Image (tube, rainbow, N blue to C red):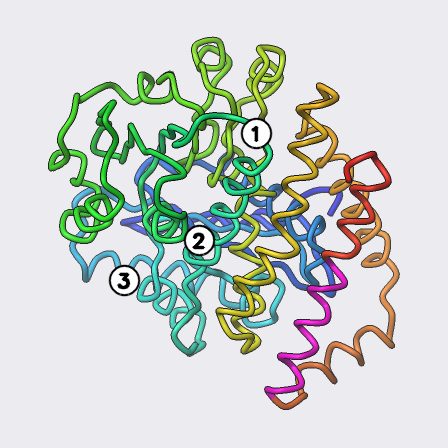
Amino acid sequence: MEHPLIILASGKTYEGFLVIDSLFNNRSAGGVRIADDLVLEEVRELAREMTIKLALFRLPRGGGKAGVRLAEGLDAEGRSAALRSFGRHCGPIIRTGLYNPAMDMNCGPEELRTIYAGAGLEIPPPTDTSFYTAISAANALLGYAEVVQSARPLTMAIEGFGNVARHMMTLLPEGLFRVTGISTVIGAVRNAEGFDPQELCREKDLHGDDLVAHLPGERIAHDDLLATDVDVLVPAARVWSITRELAERIQVRAVVPVANAPYRAGAAEILHDRGMLVLPGYLCNAGGVFGSSMADSGVPRKEIEELFRLRYRPLIKALVRMCLQSGRAAIPVVERLAVREARKRAQAQSQPSILRKLGERARRQLPVSLRRRAMWNHCIRSLDALEADFREVGIH
């Protein structure tokens, strides 16, 4: 859309935002972020990232995002009432399919179902998008590791050890990476000897964000974690965590984000100019939409994991190899391709096709087995198209 559609909602205990950045097939999708310091600018940035991501991977919807800033001190009943009210305010948009909410930071299955209930809709248990985000993030890390010639294990710091990072630890092979620093909203901890992956997962399950207080190591400031001397930095928290000032302090070989929009304006350019590989978040975390779309259509998890290993990881490897050999920056190259595809979709959306609408309706009425096969074939074609885009700009 030339100008995003912004809907504001409020009650006594919350402020809510809904931003539809683009439509495709008269649909948009994106998670609902819940935070006590959320602002409209963050939601707008995340909606734009969804447009870029969905266009890059040719998924048949536009980009949107919602956010709820809850008042401090709300109990469970108060949270539920606020989320239900937000769903009621956005109900007409949600019911028509113009925006399809999904899970995001602090918005799990129960919160999402409450929002839908407020909109007058009942949904089945939602897919755990954090797991599928972790699949792509793990394969992005493995793609990088398979290209670089370096002693093992590669050291890694993770900013924002949440559900995605916890899943990611279970997907990475033992001995390839050593996590020497992590952070949560509670604080940060560093241990040069590294944390045992099973201990990280166990403490996360037991203590949530408080796990940093239960791990052995040095308690450090959040910014000091980002500036830790490691091979790979994994931003997995909020938008814009890497500022221009921090970019001057960071000393890593590669930044492989899980978070959307982790770089402030100019920060990625500083990192690149200082000789670091800097990957875009919307490429590394694409499993959250790409993998979960297949899961929602009934594609088995093992087949999704295999597709990421055999088709997605080679694309990451080709991009990393091109950047390291040529010195080109990854983000401008990939974003140019994504924006080009988004513009094509915008033009197609501005000229509604009766055949396209009939095709969408027919696909929704297919039996589950045929819908599963149709989504699988669509995803294969999407990866074929992305591979062709990469080759066009010299990535192979």
Q: How many residues crowd mark 3 within 10 Å: few (<14), some (14–19), many (20+)?
A: some
**Quadrant of the image occupied by residue 330:** top right
Q: Main secondary structure of the magenta part?
A: helix
The residue shown at (84%, 57%) is: 350
Between 143 and 2, the residue placed more toward the observer is 143
Q: What is the x, y in percent for residue 321?
A: 68, 31
Cβ atoms at labels 3 and 2 below 8 Å apart: no
Which residue is disc 1 drawn over? 148
Give the structural element (helix, strand or loop) at label 1: loop
Q: Which mark is residue 32?
A: 2
**Quadrant of the image occupied by residue 384:** bottom right
Q: What is the x, y in percent for residue 198?
A: 23, 48
Give the structural element (helix, strand or loop) at label 2: strand
Outermost residue on the bottom side: it is 367
Residue type indicated by callout 1: Val
Between 204 and 143, the residue placed more toward the observer is 143
Q: Is residue 191 left or right of residue 90?
A: left
Cβ atoms at labels 3 and 1 below 8 Å apart: no
Extent of the magenta region? 368-382
Would residue 396 be visible to someone looking at this image? yes
Q: Is residue 181 left or right of residue 45?
A: left
Q: Is residue 105 left or right of residue 294?
A: left
> In the image, is residue 180 part of the stretch drawn in magenta?
no
> In the image, is residue 372 part of the stretch drawn in magenta?
yes
Which residue is disc 3 drawn over? 81
